[in-house]
Image (cartoon, rainbow, N blue to C red):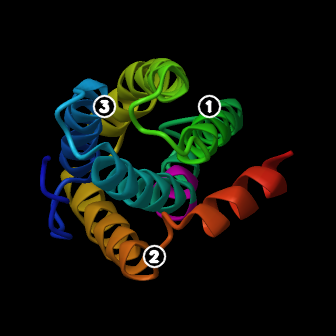
Amino acid sequence: MPKILPATGGDVVEIILADHRWFEEALRELRDVRSDRAAVLADLATVLIAHAEAEESKVYPSLRRKDAIDAEEVEHSTHEHDEGNAALLALMEVEDTDSEEFSSKTHELSEALSHHLDEEERDVLNPARTDVSEETRRLLGDAFAEERARLIDSGCGDIANVRKLVEAAD
């Protein structure tokens, strides 16, 4: 299982990309029947929720103010986070990690997450690279990493919190 990435600052684009690669590795682990799927899922839930919430509170508003992304892109990315959270909750609610249902729900989460990562890297991170100064990306990276760490420490991946986020989005 990949270790949860440390909460260090730096260029926000690079930090977000590092999380994205971590998510892909965690999904590979979830598909592997030899993995401790419950432990992998617990870590994935924690990092995924912390990542999305930190993006929504720290990154998207700043990129919007800098005109790197527009309101429609913020709304679309937030909607995709909501879809990912719903798929995550559905997977967390499966009791038997060796079941066909677990495999099916892992596939659904993987599809939702892969789609979002692709779009975010093209439509949010590319404009952040070209339309936002290096200094601003560093400041955003620090704010993102700090908020992400705070959320991880708060246990944000707990099923009760994930359920609350999904219900609030409905």
Between discs 2 and 3, the one toward the N terminus: 3
Determine whether 169 is above or below 129 in the image: below
Q: In this view, does 133 lie to the left or right of 63?
A: left
Q: What stretch is highlighted in magenta?
A: 57-62
For badge 2, the amino acid type reads: Gly
Query: Residue 15: x percent and y percent?
Result: 22, 51
125 drawn magenta: no
Which residue: 33% across, 27% down?
126
Which residue: 48% across, 63% down?
157
Q: Name the residue under label 1.
A: 73
Between discs 2 and 1, the one toward the N terminus: 1
Q: Do the residues labelled 2 and 3 touch (CB within 8 Å)?
A: no
Q: Is residue 153 left or right of residue 104?
A: left
SS assignment at label 2: loop
Q: Do the residues labelled 1 and 3 touch (CB within 8 Å)?
A: no
Query: Residue 105: x percent and y percent?
Result: 54, 26
Query: Residue 26: x percent and y percent?
Result: 25, 38
Q: Residues within 10 Å of mark 1 (few under 14, many from 20)?
A: some
Q: Return the mark for residue 83.
A: none
Q: Return the mark for residue 27.
A: 3
Q: Are marks 2 and 1 in contact (CB under 8 Å)?
A: no
User: Spatial distance from mark 1 to mark 3, Cα to Cα?
Assistant: 25 Å
Which residue: 86% across, 45% down?
170
For badge 3, the amino acid type reads: Leu
User: Spatial distance from mark 2 to mark 1, Cα to Cα?
Assistant: 28 Å
Foreground of the two, 40 or 80: 40
SS assignment at label 1: helix
Between discs 1 and 3, the one toward the N terminus: 3
Q: In this view, does 9 lie to the left or right of 69?
A: left
Q: Nearer the viewer, mark 2 or mark 1?
A: 2
Q: Mark 2 points at which residue?
A: 155
